[in-house]
Image: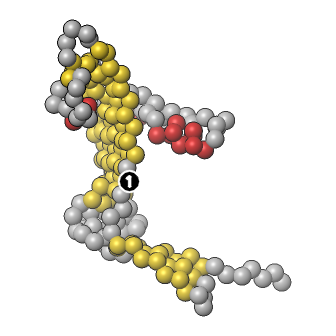
Amino acid sequence: MIKLLAKMAVDVGFTRYLTVAGVDTHLMITVPGLFKAGLDLENWKLLLSWKPTTSELRKLYHFQVRPFTSLVMNTDVQPVTINPNTRDVSATGSTLQTEQNLLGDKLGLKLLYQKQSELPIAKETWMRVPSAYNWLTSVNFALLPASLHRRFYTLTLDPATSETKKIIFYINFGTLSLG
């Protein structure tokens, strides 16, 4: 899981509290299950397989951008995002719009992609990754939100109703003969 947290605090000298504002951004990718790998040296094949180990709903992907404000004691060591005084910041008069899509039919997987956003779904913007920088900077830019509007993206797998119970990949390594 990758978690980026940016915050700014204002220390008010005559109180014991800090006024904090920030953005909680995190990305979670999980693939729970049993992985196996094998190698067939005679035929030069690499075998990779994955099988879910539970029939419960599983989040495979989750990304969120959540702006917040909070009032925190200056001696508190608790993370700001779970502090009881923390409140989400949202655009005036906006509510989260939800869009859901079923994916994975051709693979026999029951995948539900859910998108919640304050912006109209068609008008969301993504930050362009600058190409003049090295790859590490490009990855960092790709993880930063282009807008501070509150939004959540989730991809959920339902192994109980999926037709596919195991995924197997074969990778062949062979010799190339010209002739």
Query: Where is residue 117, by image quadrant?
Result: top left
In the rendered image, is residue 98 in sight?
yes
Q: Name the residue at 31% across, 15% down.
A: 10
| Label 1 Cα crowd, 10 Å radius (few <14 / some 14-19 / many 20+) | some
Q: Position of residue 157 (x, y in %)?
A: 30, 60
Position of residue 87 in the picture relative to residue 40 (left or right): left
Can you name the residue that lies furthest to the front here? 75
Can you name the residue that lies furthest to the top here? 14
Q: Name the residue at 21% across, 18% down.
A: 17
Q: Secondary structure at mark 1?
A: strand
Total numbered labels placed on residues in the image: 1
Residue type, numbered disc 1? Ile
Q: Position of residue 173 (x, y in %)?
A: 63, 79
Q: Name the residue at 40% across, 68% down.
A: 107
Can you name the residue that lies furthest to the bottom here? 42
In the rendered image, is residue 72 in sight?
no
Give the residue at mark 1: 29
Q: Position of residue 166 (x, y in %)?
A: 36, 75
Q: Which is more toward the observer, 63 or 103?
A: 63
Query: Where is residue 40, by image quadrant?
Result: bottom right
Query: Where is residue 88, by image quadrant?
Result: top left
Can you name the residue that lies furthest to the right here? 179
Q: Name the residue at 83% across, 83% down.
A: 179
Q: Which is more toward the observer, 94 or 34?
A: 34
Q: Which is more toward the observer, 15 or 38?
A: 15
Position of residue 79 in the picture relative to residue 107 (left or right): left
Color theme of the render: secondary structure
Q: Position of residue 116 (x, y in %)?
A: 30, 39
